[in-house]
Image (cartoon, helix red, strand yellow):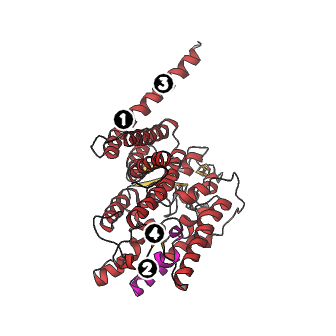
Amino acid sequence: MSNNTADIHQKETMSNLRAALATLPMMFITLIMLSGGKVPHDARHVIAFLVAFLFLNTLFFLMLRTGRTDRWRAVLFIVFAGVFVISFISHLIEARGSMAISQSEMLECRTPFCHIVIPMTIIPLALTRTIIFPGTMMGVYAAIASMFVIWIGASLSLGRGFCAWGCFFGGWDDAMSRILKRPVIRKIAGKWHYLPFAVLLAVVLTSAAALSPTYCMWLCPFKAVTEYVQVTSVKTFLQMTIFISLFAGLVLLLPLLSKKRIQCGLFCPFGAFQSFTNKVSPFEVHLDRDLCVKCGRCITVCPTFSMTEESLEKGRTRMTCIKCGKCIDNCPKGALSFHVKGASRTDHRLAQRLLFLYPSFLFLATMSGGNIQNTIVRIMGLITTGSLLAH
Ligand code: SF4
Ligand code: SF4
């Protein structure tokens, strides 16, 4: 073996070792999180636990070892969106016999809460001291209180990183935006970048006026794949038609053709709302203007229109940045990096990246881990009993 080959081999071994050591804390936390501090009680749960544990920690190791963030984040994020739907729909059917929600179930406050409703609840909460959502506060699947706690914690730490590291819907348009090699729709005019803020303003005001979450009632594309209102009238038929059309257009077709996260970047009111929390998050994406050669690659790949010509001039992203890391992965000059506000912009880049990755990955692992295990158990049940549902 030549000296050169031996050096390369030694460097690779050291890199693997460093990444493995940095993965150890994540292994410890995910071990506790996935097991809930208990030993799984049967073979199916043991297998589900082991698969989820190995899957999560392999992705984290690869993220550290390869220096690529978005590539491995996207694998978990997209898997999360898929397993969430399987697990959530199965739970709904077990709990109430159908994926559709009836008027009586709404009156009984049996609707699962989701983070997208949060901006719509704030004004009515301040004015009337009630939550305008037909869900229970405590103790049911996706209860209001737990979702508020998760949202506050994630917003304070990651800001709009919630949309790349925690949203159980985002993996849908993220997946669709990665299918084609080149976009069919190449340019989307800059004025559309303001649309989600207009949608946010409209749903906040109409929800306050109607004391009802108007986005959930009329505009949420994800009603097509989670729970929907039972079609019993012209109104509910119209709602279903809108939900399915928006899902097909904003979540499937346009992301496929444009290679952008259209629902997330141009329509979601929660995403727009969450952009403001980037101000309090300690993390941001930094652009080193001395290294940048203005090739525009980051502008092309950014899925949420958060990197523009103006960003290159100013050395920072737009406030809509979801901290997915795709621009960082793709910059040929290494001009972009995760940055901890207040820290040096040029020194300790690896440490700053690690400081960002621990809470971000842990958030995604926490949000997805239970759903991954649950779906694995259900799939094994499907193979052995012919049903995804628990008996
Ligand atoms: S990809 Fe990197 S070098 Fe190219 S414009 Fe963006 S920051 Fe500059
Ligand atoms: S600017 Fe970079 S990190 Fe932010 S959303 Fe765009 S690609 Fe992701």
Most common secondary structure along the magenta stretch:
helix
Question: Which residue type does callout 3 highlight?
Answer: Thr
Q: Residues within 10 Å of mark 3 (few under 14, many from 20)?
A: few
For the point 36% across and 63% down, the residue is 142
Residue highlighted by disc 2: 204
Query: 176 or 157: which is nearer to us?
Result: 176
Quarter holding the N terminus? top right
Q: Residues within 10 Å of mark 4 (few under 14, many from 20)?
A: many
Q: Quadrant of residue 274?
A: bottom left
Is ligand 1 within 8 Å of the beta carbon of the residue shown at mark 3? no
Inspect the magenta stretch and tell me whether residue 204 lies in it: yes
> Between disc 3 and disc 1, whose residue precedes?
3
Query: 244 or 47: which is nearer to us?
Result: 47
Query: Marks 4 and 3, Cα distance to the nearest angstrom?
Result: 44 Å
Label ID, residue 270: 4
Question: Which residue type does callout 2 highlight?
Answer: Val
Residue highlighted by disc 3: 13
Task: Work out whether residue 289 can be spotted.
Answer: no
The answer to the question of whether label 3 and label 2 lie on touching residues, with beta carbons closer than 8 A, is: no
Q: Nearer the viewer, mark 3 or mark 2?
A: 2
Query: Marks 2 and 1, Cα distance to the nearest angstrom?
Result: 43 Å
Identify the secondary structure beneath mark 3.
helix
Quarter holding the C terminus? bottom left
Q: Which residues are magenta?
A: 202-223
Query: Marks 4 and 1, Cα distance to the nearest angstrom?
Result: 34 Å
Q: Residues within 10 Å of mark 1 (few under 14, many from 20)?
A: few
Identify the secondary structure beneath mark 1.
helix
Task: Work out whether residue 119 can be spotted.
Answer: yes
> Between disc 2 and disc 1, whose residue precedes?
1
The answer to the question of whether label 4 and label 3 lie on touching residues, with beta carbons closer than 8 A, is: no
Residue highlighted by disc 1: 24
x and y percent of residue 302 in the render? 58, 56
